[in-house]
Image (spheres, rainbow, N blue to C red):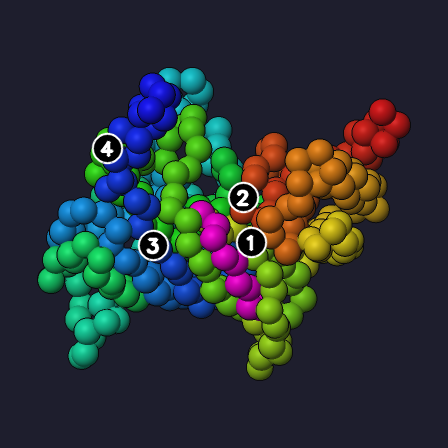
Amino acid sequence: MNKLLFSLLLFLDANAHALPNQVNYQMSVELHPVTDQITGKEIVQLTNKTPETLDKLYFHVYPNAFRWEKDSTYMQEIQKFENPDLHFLKGKNGSWLKIYSIQNTLQAPLKTLDFSVEKELMTVKLQTPLKPGQSIGLEIDFTTQIGAIMERSGVWKQNFSIGQWFPKLMVYDENGWALKHNAGYHYIGEFYGDFGNYDVDITVPTEIKIGATGHQTKEEDLPNHKKRYFFHAENVHDFAWVADPAYNEETFKVGHTTLHILTHHPETKVISQFAKAALEYITQRVGPYPYDDFTVAETYYNGTMEYPQIIFVKTFPASLSRWVERD
């Protein structure tokens, strides 16, 4: 046996216990544009793939990074570089995520679980510890307040960019719960999450158009001028979405993938040309995109941000679009 193969086998043996947890999400939520809030419930289904018996579960509550109190991990870190007050626009609220109740759905009658929230981290105490191989379902009732655009998420000019918005289970890796390096929402850094399946339905006023992670399976007209959209995503590590009454949608087919382009202005339709060309190029050079749907959405987020099956792209003026088209 050569040294490289032997080393690989040792590594695999040492990390055999480091299997990712199996985590699936079912969410039913509603967007309230008048208050800039999202209300709803989520059911988190977790199978313990770790070698440990778990008596607690940890969840991210990322919107709390942008509360008015400015005491979060993000706010403490950003002060080393700039004034955080510059990110709180006049007339707009800060963001927060409030948890009302958590119940164990696999117990009859339903058992209400104790939990505590500190800044961007929620700790849930299990009444019965979860042994390796066992599963649990948690139903979480929550409200998310959406503030002005800050980092990846927020609302501006009736455009909602919704990322890091729901209670999300923290990763348990080969070092245990990722509390040391991943408990907070950091000023510089990305997001570390388990892969799983998402079934999400989103209710919005009828005039609002949305795009999201996953494949839209159906839509329903509801009373009081509302509409409900249903999305299903498989083997992704997050779920993000956008909403705006001004969106115009174009769709293209690249291989088996449907490319959805959501833009505000005639000048920015150039986005669709380059998104289509880019996906075709990558398909030829690397291979087909592994999902059936991919969305590029124009937003007011200051930059671009990639999520599973959706990318937020900053809106840009006509002069820039002409420059991109020319070059």
Disc 2 to disc 4, C-alpha distance: 31 Å
- The numbered dot on residue 307 is 2
Dot 1: what SS? loop
Disc 1 to disc 3, C-alpha distance: 19 Å
- Seen from this angle, which residue lies furthest bottom? 223
Badge 2 crowding class, 10 Å Cα cut-off, few under 14, some 14 to 19, many 20 or more, is some
Label 1 vs label 3, nearer the camera: 3
Residue located beneath label 4 in the image: 14
Q: Is residue 97 above or below residue 216?
A: above
Closest to the observer, 274 or 90: 274
Percent across and percent down for residue 257 are: 69, 53
Left or right: residue 267 versus residue 116 is: right
Total numbered badges shown on the rendered structure: 4
Q: Which residues are magenta?
A: 229-237
**Which of the two discs, 1 and 3, labels the residue nearer the N terminus?**
3
**Which of the two discs, 2 and 4, labels the residue nearer the N terminus?**
4
Residue located beneath label 3 in the image: 22
State if disc 2 and disc 1 touch (CB < 8 Å). Answer: yes
Determine the residue positioned at 41% across, 65% down. Answer: 26
Residue 232: say if magenta: yes
Disc 4 to disc 3, C-alpha distance: 20 Å
Dot 2: what SS? strand
Disc 1 to disc 4, C-alpha distance: 35 Å
